[in-house]
Amino acid sequence: MTDAVGEIERLFIYACWDASMDGTLIFSALWVMLPAYIPNNAAVVAGGGLPVDGGRTLNGNRLLGDGKTWRGILLGTLAGVCVAGTLNISAPFVQMIGFNPIRFSLRAAFGLAFGAMCGDLFASFLKRRMGKQRGAPLPGIDQLDFVCGALCVTTILAPGWTFQVFNVALIGVVIIVTPLLHVMTNIVAFVTSLKDEPYWT
Ligand code: CTP
Ligand code: MG
């Protein structure tokens, strides 16, 4: 047990050290997670229309709510896959400046994008079960639901790719960096009136 804690501590220090020394880990974390970051933002801009739950309720509360739509899922996933394709195309150029960027297989790209949307759906399902209305915050879950969804679905669809790319250090950096990024993009969306809810949701 103490060995395991020591190992986690060592990897965490290694992650922070490496990230602060040359930024390689932070760069890799942002690069590999971009196809999972974009779908939720694309859904805010392009979503709307028919809700996924079709208005159905469970114990008096909506199953998911009007904030989760088919169009959001479809266009969000498509946007994430397109981002992964764009990153693949730009990888040789990024390599020229000294980084060794990760390439995305189609399964990995789809897993990251669709998985992010699934994580978001699951968070809404949880919120409705807790009696929270659409847009109500659920701190912690709101900032990491799409990361968990992306990792789970990618592990199922592209296990080889996932285990090759995501080591403990990279996952550690993703977990630290993602909530910060999420809050920052939500501030922009709130200030520009793209989102009605406060920036922490
Ligand atoms: N959106 C969508 N389809 C999705 C996800 C998001 O159409 N699958 C759009 C909706 O217009 C939604 C907005 O993006 O209102 C913001 O997304 P989000 O914050 O995830 O939804 P909320 O409205 O806050 O609802 P919830 O409380 O269920 O998270
Ligand atoms: Mg919200």
Image: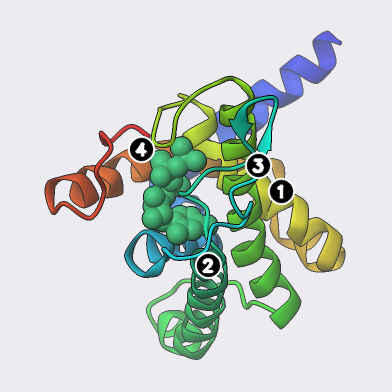
What amino acid does circle 2 point to?
Pro
Q: Which residue does the numbered mark 1 point to in the structure image? A: 167
Nearest to N terminus: mark 1 or mark 3: 3
Image-quarter location of ligand 2: top left
Q: Position of residue 29 (x, y in %)?
A: 52, 54
Q: Nearer the viewer, mark 3 or mark 2?
A: 3
Q: Nearer the viewer, residue 93 or 76?
A: 76
Q: Which residue does the numbered mark 2 point to in the structure image? A: 35
Q: Which residue does the numbered mark 3 point to in the structure image? A: 122
Q: Nearer the viewer, mark 3 or mark 4?
A: 3
Task: State how far apart marks 4 and 2 are (Cα).
Answer: 17 Å
Q: Nearer the viewer, mark 1 or mark 2?
A: 2
Nearest to N terminus: mark 3 or mark 4: 3
Nearest to N terminus: mark 3 or mark 2: 2
Q: Nearer the viewer, residue 113 or 120?
A: 120
Q: Nearer the viewer, mark 1 or mark 3?
A: 3
